[in-house]
Image: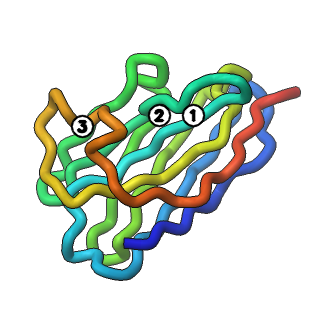
Amino acid sequence: VQLQACGGGLVQPGGFLRLSCVASGRTISIGVMGWFRQALGKEREFVAATRWSDAMTNVADSVKGRFTISRDRVKTTVYLQMNSLKPVDTAVYYCAAGTTRPILSTIRRETTFDSWGQGTQLTVSS
């Protein structure tokens, strides 16, 4: 599976943005898709994920209530709607896909995902 993410940019605090990630290739094998982010000098962290079959979602506590993940199975696309953005959200955002159908306890793990996109930069600054 190949992943192409887009939608990053420069946003003012309190603003909103939507990231998109299109999957291509052997998309029939997708079991889960998600987003991770990595801020400068920090480790990559889980942001949100959605199980492909039933759209079950899981969102990191740090973005809960502000970020929403959704998927379009026909377009093989996953979205990350980001509202009320803060400077701490500044990071490179990576789209990821996995072939398993994870349970709640494993959906946040990087090892659940085996395909990664190239990353898109989000900068939240005034």
Q: Decide which of 70, 29 is in the foreground and name it.
A: 29
Q: CA distance from mark 3 to mark 1?
A: 23 Å
Label 2 or label 3, whichever comes before in sequence order: 2
* Quadrant for the C terminus in the image: top right
Callout 3: helix, strand or loop? loop
- Residue 45 image label: none
Q: Could you tell me the amino acid type at mark 1? A: Asn
Q: CA distance from mark 2 to mark 1?
A: 6 Å
Give the x, y percent position of residue 79.
45, 54
Task: Tell me what residue is drawn at x 16 percent, y 54 percent.
Answer: 100
Give the x, y percent position of residue 36.
48, 39
Quickly name the residue at label 1: 83
Q: Are marks 2 and 1 in contact (CB under 8 Å)?
A: yes
Q: Could you tell me the amino acid type at mark 2? A: Phe
Quickly name the residue at label 2: 67
Quickly name the residue at label 3: 107
Asked if residue 85 is positioned above or below residue 116 in the image, the reply reads above
Label 3 or label 1, whichever comes before in sequence order: 1
Label 2 or label 1, whichever comes before in sequence order: 2
Q: Could you tell me the amino acid type at mark 3? A: Ile
The local crowd at label 2, few if under 14, some if 14 to 19, many if 20 or more residues have their Cα within 10 Å, is many
- Image check: 126 left or right of 55? right
